Amino acid sequence: MWWLVRFAYWTGLLLSLSLSACAGDEVDTDLGPKFDDKADLSECAGYDGGHLSGDDLLVLINKGEGQQLAKRWAPRDLVSVDDHLMIPGREATLRLGVLQAYEKLASKAELEMGLDLRIRSAYRSFATQCRTFAYWVDTKGLEHAQRFSAEPGRSQHQLGTTIDITSEALGYENSSGDIEATEYTWLAENAHRFGFALAYPKGEDDTTGYGFEPWHYRFIGHEAALEMHDAGLILETYLLACQNAPTDLQCPQEELAEVIPNDRFIGGMCEAQEDCRTVSSDAVCLDEEDGYPGGQCALPCEASCPDRAGANAVTFCVVHPTDEFVGLCHSRCDDERFPGSGCRDGYSCVEASRPSGSTGMVCLPR
Ligand SMILES: [Zn+2]
């Protein structure tokens, strides 16, 4: 927590939230406007989360004891997925290196088979999963929630490396009625070439805890996906073997591309102060108590922000609500980069003032 920053005054902002639920973990249901009036973190109070970090691309996440992500863990390199890769009307984020690998996969699918693969769902935060899970507990009871949704910390989508894939021909849905679709056959045969693994294969319910989900792919790294494929293992058994080393497997960890602050990504997510060093030595890590559930690096400012991205075009010094001499650099809204909202997922475009009095449109957390 950073003592200077309290963003409670923004909680009155219009909230808009699109939630996804998953059966298996994964049938994806847009809960829509029902959630507009309850989009806060109170639903997470009952969920402690686990202790695992998604920094390990091979971390095993499932319904088992201990195989749960930490509440505070979030990817620090999320970027927005371009519209042409998404189903219409949806926005999503993925870790940059994963998005790069997926772009190659999608263009190869088009080249080889004329397929127009689209992402239906990608990164989902711990908080999103809290709201989704709580919704199902409230409306259908705990047993139903555990069957058709994932407890917070137990969804692979929190990793920022996992995607649900569909296409126009599949009605942009993820349905078990489409398991023989060309899209899914091609993915099953080729995804490992691009570092992705099918998480819940057919007939492996007893091992994975989930039914067949031909649309749900997780990036584990190019070499690891090849090794898993060549060893004839499924994701669950491969990750388990890697976790319970020693093993004959290499379990290679791939280093993902780094995000350049203020290039495609703004600010940088953080868990601790040192995570903000790539932004600036002066940057501070704002956390959940400051109103940033995923953690967010920001630069203190008094008038303008340092020119880190050319002509100071993308940042704006926003006055602190209770101290007119203190501000924080925030991203300006950018409709080209984030069509429609002007901001990346989880942020709203609102008018804010500099300490000097001038105003600008910036992205603030919802
Ligand atoms: Zn999924």
Image: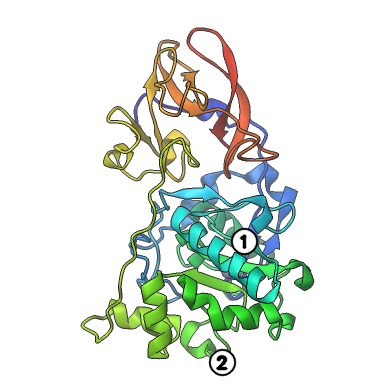
Residue under pointer 1: 121
**Residue 122: percent from left, percent from top:** 57, 60
Q: Secondary structure at mark 1?
A: strand
The quadrant where residue 332 appears: top right
* Image quarter hosting the C terminus: top right
Residue 295 percent coordinates (x, y):
41, 42
Give the color scheme: rainbow, by chain, secondary structure or one colour.
rainbow
Disc 1: residue Cβ within 8 A of ligand 1's nearest atom:
yes
Q: Residue at x 48, y 71 (%)?
A: 194
Q: Quadrant of residue 203?
A: bottom right
Q: Amino acid at mark 2?
A: Gly
Label drawn at residue 111: none
Whole-Å distance between the Cαs marked 2 and 1? 24 Å
Point out the quarter of the image occupied by ligand 1: bottom right
Residue at horizontal 67 percent and vertical 38 percent from the top: 341
Specify the label residue 203 is tagged with: 2
